[in-house]
Image (cartoon, grey):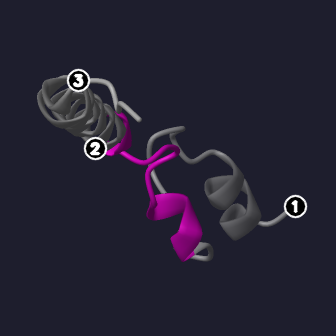
Amino acid sequence: MTDQDASSSSTEPGRASPEDPLDALPKHPTGTLAIVLAYGALFALFWAWIYFGVFLGRGAPTS
């Protein structure tokens, strides 16, 4: 084992090795949960507005 091999295998866990640039990327997408929750909240809000404001607001269909 050469000195270069020993130094590359003893890198700190948080540091990326110069050989693999993909190690520099975060392990999970940051902010994704916030985007999904915001989308879900808007979806629920608009669904409730359509259901209560439009559908129930017009009343039951009569024949």
Question: In the rendered structure, which amino acid carries the disc numbered 2?
Answer: Ile
Left or right position of 13 against 25? right
Which type of secondary structure does the marked residue at label 1 adopt? loop
Location of the N terminus (image quadrant)? bottom right
Compared to 31, does 37 lie above or below?
A: above
Q: Residue at x 36, y 40 (%)?
A: 36
Q: Which residue is mark 3?
A: 56
Q: Real-space Cα distance between discs 3 and 2?
A: 30 Å
Provide residue 26's location: percent of width, then percent of height. Answer: 44, 50
Q: Nearer the viewer, mark 1 or mark 3?
A: 3
Q: Real-space Cα distance between discs 1 and 3?
A: 76 Å
Q: Residue at x 69, y 63 (%)?
A: 3
Provide residue 10's location: percent of width, then percent of height. Answer: 63, 45
Q: Residue at x 36, y 44 (%)?
A: 32
Provide residue 45's location: percent of width, then percent of height. Answer: 19, 30
Which type of secondary structure does the marked residue at label 3 adopt? helix
Question: In the rendered structure, which amino acid carries the disc numbered 1?
Answer: Met
Q: Which residue is mark 1?
A: 1
Which type of secondary structure does the marked residue at label 2 adopt? helix
* Disc nearer the start of the sequence (1/3): 1
Q: Which mark is residue 35?
A: 2
* Disc nearer the start of the sequence (3/2): 2
Residue extent of the magenta highlight: 21-33
Q: Real-space Cα distance between discs 1 and 2?
A: 47 Å
Left or right position of 35 against 13? left
Left or right position of 57 against 26? left
Q: Which mark is residue 54?
A: none
What is the residue that sits farthest to the right in this orientation?
A: 1
Which of 17/59 is in front? 59
Which of 49/43 is in front? 49
Question: In the rendered structure, which amino acid carries the disc numbered 3?
Answer: Leu
